[in-house]
Image (cartoon, rainbow, N blue to C red):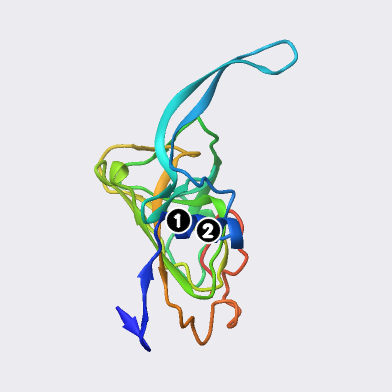
Amino acid sequence: MKTNGEDIMILNDRQIIARILDEGMIAPAFVTQRRTRDYVLGYGPSGTSTLQVPKKIISMGVSSFGYDIQLGEDFKIFTSAHCGTVDPKNLNESCFVSMHVAWPSKLLIPPNGFVLGHSAERWKIPRDISAIVLGKSTYARCGLIVNCTPLEPEWEGTITLELTNSTPLPLVVYPGEGIAQALFYQNPDGCEVSYADRAGKYQGQTGLTLPKV
């Protein structure tokens, strides 16, 4: 695809790593794909770990043409117990139950349930890049739907992730492991007005953020 004679391209692993190292596009970031994480089996009297073993995880970090996002540890689980309607212009906090779940513990999403989560990484999208976020195949094959709106040029913050369990059974997700993949599209022309230029309402968000108007 071309615009004004310039190629619009998807970034490969080398280009993603360069953007991470040179511009801080993702932090903290794994510049190689990570498929294990050390699991501590015990601690000594001084509090130092006595034995660590690598535990298989759902992959995170740089992939061939994307970045596998690490799921953060804070969640808001949707509940209808104290919530009469779901209004994007006036969403009541009582529609959610907050939970903190740290690796290697896991979160159960209720049958046909909906949960808000967030990326463990902070993102700083350059002016000439827009990113889209897609689910990972491991979770997709289990009925998890990951929804996230595009990461616009010059947006900064942690990503709020919408996680939907489409099955009639509880579904497990793992904080501290991969949850979705970001693909980065570069337009050398940049954009006329970036997310920062128009003072977007989700600029600089941390953790997970409820809808704003």
Give the residue type at disc 1: Arg
Q: Secondary structure at mark 2?
A: helix
Residue at 29 percent across and 78 percent down: it is: 1
Task: Residue lying at the far top in this picture: please name it.
Answer: 45
Question: Picture coordinates of residue 87 (x, y %)?
Answer: 45, 68
Q: Is residue 158 visible?
A: no
Q: Is residue 47 above or below residue 205?
A: above
Q: Which numbered circle lies on residue 125?
A: none
* Left or right for 3, reference 91: left
Q: Where's residue 73, x and y in %? A: 54, 42
For numbered disc 1, what is the local secondary structure? Answer: helix
Mark 1 near mark 2, Cβ–Cβ under 8 Å?
yes
| x, y percent for residue 90 | 52, 69
CA gap, disc 1 and disc 2:
6 Å
Q: Few, some or many C-alpha atoms within 10 Å of disc 2 (few <14, some 14-19, many ≥20)?
A: few
Q: For residue 195, which quarter of the picture?
A: bottom right
Q: Whole-percent x and y of residue 18?
A: 53, 58
Residue that label 2 marks = 18
Vertical placement of 151 versus 7: above or below?
Answer: above
Total label count? Answer: 2
Residue at 51 percent of width and 73 percent of height = 153
Q: Amino acid at mark 2?
A: Ala
Count residues near mark 1 (Cα–Cα under 10 Å), then give few for <14, some for 14-19, many for 20+: some
Q: Is residue 165 left or right of residue 87?
A: left
In terms of image quadrants, where is residue 123?
bottom right
Kindly identify the residue that appears in the image at 53 percent across and 75 percent down.
127
Residue to which mark 1 is pinned: 14
